[in-house]
Amino acid sequence: MRIVVLAGGIGGARFLRGLQQASPDADITVIGNTGDDIHLFGLKVCPDLDTVMYTLGGGINEEQGWGRTDETFHLKEELAAYGVGPEWFGLGDRDFATHIVRTQMLGAGYPLSAVTEALCDRWKPGVRLIPMSDDRVETHVAVTLPDSGERKVIHFQEYWVRLRASLAAEAVVPVGAEQAKPAPGVLEAIAEADVILFPPSNPVVSIGTILAVPGIREAIADAGVPVVGLSPIVGDAPVRGMADKVLAAVGVESTAAAVAEHYGSGLLDGWLVDTVDASAVARVESAGIRCRAVPLMMSDLDAAARMAREALTLAEEVRGA
Ligand code: GDP
Ligand code: CA
């Protein structure tokens, strides 16, 4: 079975690990979000691609959910001693190596998709990981600074990591997305998929950004195979992160049902909500999306695998309907 998964960082990566356990023989292609990418210290950092690669490759810091295991921060301390920041973005010594290799290869002319493949040669994530695009896309967030009242557009990482999403997100803009082309292999993988899954990733700044690359949304809608998503919103709040803030920016309430409606029946065939949101099932189904309530907390690998099985079961139900 060929499965295509659109993934952000932590939510996507943890789900993927469950999917691999649930479906060990599946041929899985992951289309990764690159809207979170940022240039720091002259290096190209791709947080979501790396979270997927490290998680599936066994190099992730499990408690944190991002960054390397067994990490040290000497390089960052030395940079800070020179007064060179930003100090708010956590880059460890081991992690730095990934960004140096990536930046060096990009400088030599390789596209990001080829670089990602080369990095995965080491990590062997067991999936084919493709960035959504080889073109530069950077998500920016419009905020009003409380002190000056000045309206400012800042990089998503500055909004999330430096400001901890403490201000309202007034708009979310995937800068460059309109001009971006899907990376080689993205549209082909979608066209050849048997099932397409949206893991519990951020619907705006992860999956929404991938869908903003012209051609990807259309390819999924036209693929003619079941498209099933899992809600990242449980009990009217994100399990972690700032999905509520960025959903508000696009006028969507933070409920499992509203996120399904936001994707819409033109894209989604099936939607899983958590058992605490069982009352949302009728609303989602009346929007033309088949819906089930099952436990959606990825407390451990087995729980994530059960969620993946439920998603595949729902996909088969949709296919048979
Ligand atoms: P990020 O790029 O690291 O923010 O990761 P993603 O976009 O892949 O995932 C973030 C989303 O995953 C957030 O909206 C969370 O609410 C959601 N999430 C994280 N852990 C869980 C979980 O155990 N269950 C569910 N249902 N959602 C989760
Ligand atoms: Ca992310």
Image (cartoon, rainbow, N blue to C red):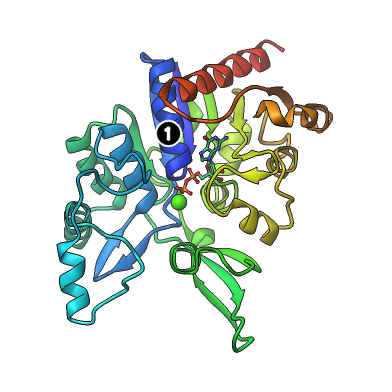
Q: Residue at x 42, y 15 (%)?
A: 23
Work out which quarter of the rendered image holds the C terminus and state it: top right
Q: Is residue 108 left or right of residue 299?
A: left
Furthest residue to the top?
320
Q: Nearer the viewer, residue 274 or 184?
A: 274
Q: Residue at x 27, y 45 (%)?
A: 116
Q: Is mark 1 within 8 Å of ligand 1?
A: yes
Q: Answer above or below: position of 321 versus 134.
A: above
Q: Nearer the viewer, residue 66 or 272?
A: 66
Work out which quarter of the rendered image holds the N terminus and state it: top left
Q: Residue at x 66, y 13 (%)?
A: 317
Q: Answer above or below: position of 213 versus 231.
A: below
Classify mark 1: helix, strand or loop: helix
Label 1 belongs to which residue? 14
Q: Nearer the viewer, residue 217 or 56?
A: 56
Q: Position of residue 264 (x, y in %)?
A: 72, 39
Q: Position of residue 170 (x, y in %)?
A: 66, 69
Q: Position of residue 197 (x, y in %)?
A: 54, 30
Q: How many numbered discs?
A: 1
Furthest residue to the bottom?
148
Q: Answer above or below: position of 51 versus 269.
A: below
- Residue 73 seen by the camera: yes
- Residue 194 seen by the camera: no
Q: Position of residue 179 (x, y in %)?
A: 50, 61
Q: Residues within 10 Å of mark 1 (few under 14, many from 20)?
A: many
Q: Answer above or below: position of 69 versus 35.
A: above
Which amino acid does the dot numbered 1 rest on? Arg
Question: Residue 45's quadrant in the figure?
Answer: bottom left
Q: Residue at x 51, y 22 (%)?
A: 308
